[in-house]
């Protein structure tokens, strides 16, 4: 856990922050709840799809109560949801979510990973090294 000290008129204000990798300049933490991660990737067949790691959408449960992180594939040009799997991550696992996104994009881009739920499942069931 990092600490940030700031001088104000001779007084020291100590602000307790979280992992500095996931802290904005205003000392608020990043979360997948408010900021899902998304990246486009071109598949070997030429299609461009969006890869998303974020909180699952559920219209019946308030967003603040959700903690299930999903890995999803979208073909936005066709408006089609290709695949989605629940991960072992929580909303605050931003670093691991970034690593998962990188891993999925790399595999989809080079063809070693098919754009299916079955192919995504092994990635979703592990916490990637950051």
Image (tube, rainbow, N blue to C red):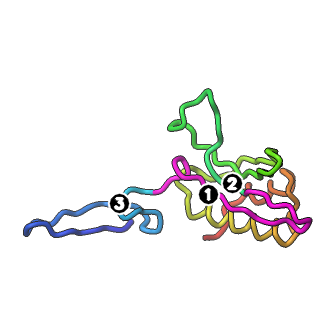
Q: 57 left or right of 25?
A: right
The single residue placed furthest to the front in the displayed view is 77
Numbered range of the magenta stretch: 30-50
> In the structure shown, which secondary structural element does the residue marked by tag 1 occupy?
strand
The residue shown at (62%, 50%) is 54
- The answer to whether the residues at label 2 and label 1 have Cβ atoms under 8 Å apart is yes
- SS of the residue at dot 3? loop
Per the image, is 49 magenta? Answer: yes
Q: Residue at x 76, y 60 (%)?
A: 123
Residue 67, x across and y down, in percent: 58, 43
Q: Nearer the viewer, residue 1 or 75?
A: 75
Residue 39 on the magenta segment: yes
Is 128 placed above or below 56 here? below
Q: Is the residue 79 above or below the residue 93 in the image?
A: above
**Going 68% across and 48% down the picture, which residue do you hit?**
70
Residue 114: where, in percent of width, then height? 88, 60
Q: Which residue is mark 1?
A: 37
From what the image shows, is residue 58 above or below residue 83?
above
The label on residue 27 is 3
Closer to the chain start, of discs 3 and 1, is 3
Q: CA distance from mark 3 to mark 1?
A: 20 Å
Outermost residue, right side: 45
Query: How many residues crowd mark 3 within 10 Å: few (<14), some (14–19), many (20+)?
Result: some
Label 2 sits on residue: 52
Disc 2 residue crowd, few under 14, some 14–19, many 20+, Cα 10 Å: many
Q: Residue 117, which numbered label?
A: none
């Amino acid at each position: 856990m990092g600490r940030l000290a700031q001088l104000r008129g001779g007084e020291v204000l100590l602000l307790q922050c979280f992992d500095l990798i996931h802290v904005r300049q205003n000392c608020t933490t990043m979360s997948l709840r408010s900021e899902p991660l998304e990246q486009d990737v071109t598949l070997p067949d030429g299609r461009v799809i969006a890869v998303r790691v974020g909180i699952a959408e559920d219209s019946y449960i308030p967003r603040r109560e959700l903690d299930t992180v999903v890995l999803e594939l979208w073909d936005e040009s066709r408006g089609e949801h290709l695949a989605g799997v629940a991960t072992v991550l929580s909303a605050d696992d931003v670093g691991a979510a970034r690593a998962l996104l990188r891993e999925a994009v790399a595999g989809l881009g080079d063809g070693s990973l098919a754009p299916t739920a079955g192919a995504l499942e092994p990635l979703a069931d592990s916490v990637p090294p950051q």
